[in-house]
Image (cartoon, rainbow, N blue to C red):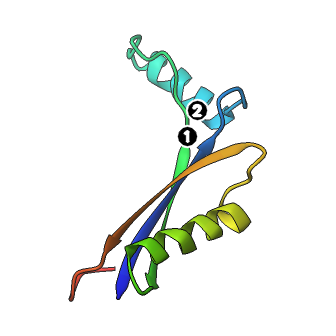
């Protein structure tokens, strides 16, 4: 079966996020005074073949731990869904 996985990675709480600070400053300068905090992350979308959703999620977790996220400074979340036939990649 074909699956589409999304690994969302962000800096752990307590790790300074210079991009987030820059965006926060820009939003405030644009008049968005309500903004309290901005954290920037990334989404990595991976198409893969697996026997089922559980195996796909396990593979994505392994990828995240081994390469996609730095466990010292970053946290991550994995989401997996079955790819529909003819779906755009």
In this rendering, position of residue 20 left or right of residue 4: right
In what quadrant of the picture does the N terminus appear? bottom left
- Of callouts 1 and 2, which one flags the residue occurring earlier in the amino acid sequence? 2
In this rendering, position of residue 89 left or right of residue 87: right
Residue plotted at (52% across, 28% down): 38
Label 1: element kind: loop
In which quarter of the view is residue 3 placed?
bottom left
Q: Where is residue 45 in the image (x, y as percent from the top left)?
A: 46, 68
The numbered mark at residue 20 is 2
> Badge 1 local density, few (<14 within 10 Å), some, or many (20+)?
few
The numbered mark at residue 70 is none
Given residues 15 and 54, the one toward you in this image is 54
Residue plotted at (74% across, 42% down): 73
Q: Evaluate whether residue 46 shows in this view.
A: no
The numbered mark at residue 40 is 1
Given residues 52 and 85, the one toward you in this image is 52
Residue that lies at the very extreme toward the right in this rendered image = 72
Tell me the distance, in whole angstroms, between the alpha carbons under discs 1 and 2.
5 Å
Q: Position of residue 8 (x, y in %)?
A: 51, 53
Picture layout, residue 16 above or below residue 36: below
Q: Evaluate whether residue 15 shows in this view.
A: yes
In which quarter of the view is residue 72 placed?
top right
In which quarter of the view is residue 13 placed?
top right
Label 2 near label 1: C-beta < 8 Å? yes
Label 2: element kind: helix
Picture layout, residue 9 above or below residue 56: above
> Badge 2 local density, few (<14 within 10 Å), some, or many (20+)?
some
Residue plotted at (71% across, 67% down): 67
Q: Where is residue 70 in the image (x, y as percent from the top left)?
A: 74, 53
Q: Where is residue 61 in the image (x, y as percent from the top left)?
A: 58, 64
In what quadrant of the picture does the C terminus appear? bottom left
Count of marks, rendered view: 2
């Amino acid at each position: 079966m074909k699956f589409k996985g999304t690994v969302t990675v962000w800096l752990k709480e307590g790790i300074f996020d210079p991009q987030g600070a820059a965006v926060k400053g820009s939003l405030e300068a644009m008049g968005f005074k309500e903004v309290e905090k901005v954290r920037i992350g990334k989404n990595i979308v991976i198409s893969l073949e697996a026997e089922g959703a559980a195996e796909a999620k396990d593979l994505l977790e392994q990828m995240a731990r081994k390469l996609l996220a730095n466990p010292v400074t970053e946290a991550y979340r994995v989401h997996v869904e079955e790819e529909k036939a003819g779906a755009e990649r």
